[in-house]
Amino acid sequence: MPRVFSGIQPSGVPTLGNYLGAIRNWVPMQNGDESLFCVVDLHAITVWQDPRELARQTREMAAALIACGIDPKRCILFCQSHVRAHAELAWIFNCVARIGWLNRMTQFKDKAGKDREAASAGLYVYPNLMAADIHAYHATQVPVGDDQKQHLELANDIGEKFNHDYGVEFFPHIDPLIQGVAARVMSLRDGTKKMSKSDPSDQSRINLTDDADAIALKIRRAKTDAEPLPEMVTALEARPEARNLVGILAAVTGAAPDAVLRDHAGKGFGAFKEVLSEALVAHLSPIAAEMRRLLADPGAVDAALAEGAHKAAAIAEPIVTRAKEIVGFLPAR
Ligand code: TYM
């Protein structure tokens, strides 16, 4: 099996979007040292993070991944800042990527907001670090949500330009794996915006740590429209909030969206929302309980991350050392 890499930022509690769009798809891809899952704290500080919170959130994210089924014995689970190769290769990629390429990144435009001049330089070169994360392992399979597609295209552009400029076949082509009906879970308050851990409104998202009451309340308050549910999902094209809730129920229950609609066609959202809350609580409450159990022994989570970092560094270091030689750096003795 080709090598798998994916990452998640410890910039808050993982959301239902992270879970359905990414983490859940990582679970069946675990294959020992051929699968790497990374808590990307270097990426997180591209926007301000409270230093006391960042370490706690990093550990919490690792616990969340384990609680979702990422088993540190069956894959490499680690923290990005523990492996130097990421930052080293990212610098080389800063010198390979073109400013024009970075200017096209829609996520930079969204995250930097109106005052682009005040955004960190790190936020601007963020995709170069992401390319380094993957290329440092010669990984070729990257399971992500739909919002990461443009970054992965750039990672391929960077790998190709490096190979071309230095006349080598060194970095392989990366295949983005964007899977399932929930590759893009939207905000509960606005069906045109993605659900995000950094949205100022907690009502916009389901967090993996939410209890049953919080989930029920958020779903009850979720924005919908006054029309009854149709029979086919194609009829939801212009109804983003309704389409999102149907997609979430389909993803959580494993049913096709049309099958979900068949049970609710012609009805309003009251009964549908109850079914959705129940399904979410049944699915997420064991994950939250496992997270609490894991976080009661933070030392064990930290030890798992330390072991992961050790294994990750053993793969990345020879690759990045070779990249430095290709560039022409004098080898360190
Ligand atoms: P991050 O932390 O924003 O999100 C982690 C993963 O969750 C997916 N995701 C979603 N999927 C569906 N619906 C949503 N609303 C939703 N929100 C988030 C993301 O697509 C992602 O797969 N830049 C990355 C982290 C990263 C990375 C990498 C990923 C750093 N290096 C290398 C892959 C490979 C990010 O910010 O993810």
Image: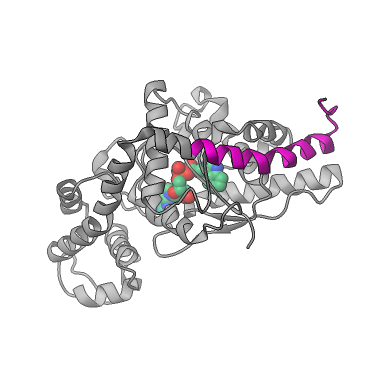
In the displayed structure image, the side of residue 236 where residue 169 appears, left or right: right
- Quick one: 185 or 102, which is closer to the camera? 185
* Magenta region, main secondary structure: helix
Question: What range is drawn magenta here?
Answer: 305-333
Residue 6: image location, x then y, percent: 53, 49
Residue at x-position 50% and y-position 50%: 73
What residue do we see at 79% from left, 39% from top?
A: 322
Residue 145 is one of the magenta-drawn residues? no
Color style of the picture: one colour
Q: Is residue 319 magenta?
A: yes
Q: Nearer the viewer, residue 46 or 266?
A: 46
Q: Which x, y percent locates residue 309?
A: 56, 37
Q: Position of residue 36 (x, y in %)?
A: 56, 48
Q: Is residue 273 above or below residue 100?
A: below
Visible residue check, residue 111: yes
Quadrant the N terminus occupies = bottom right
Q: Is residue 51 above or below residue 265?
A: above
Compared across the picture, whether 109 is left or right of 277 comes to right
Quarter of the view holding residue 327: top right
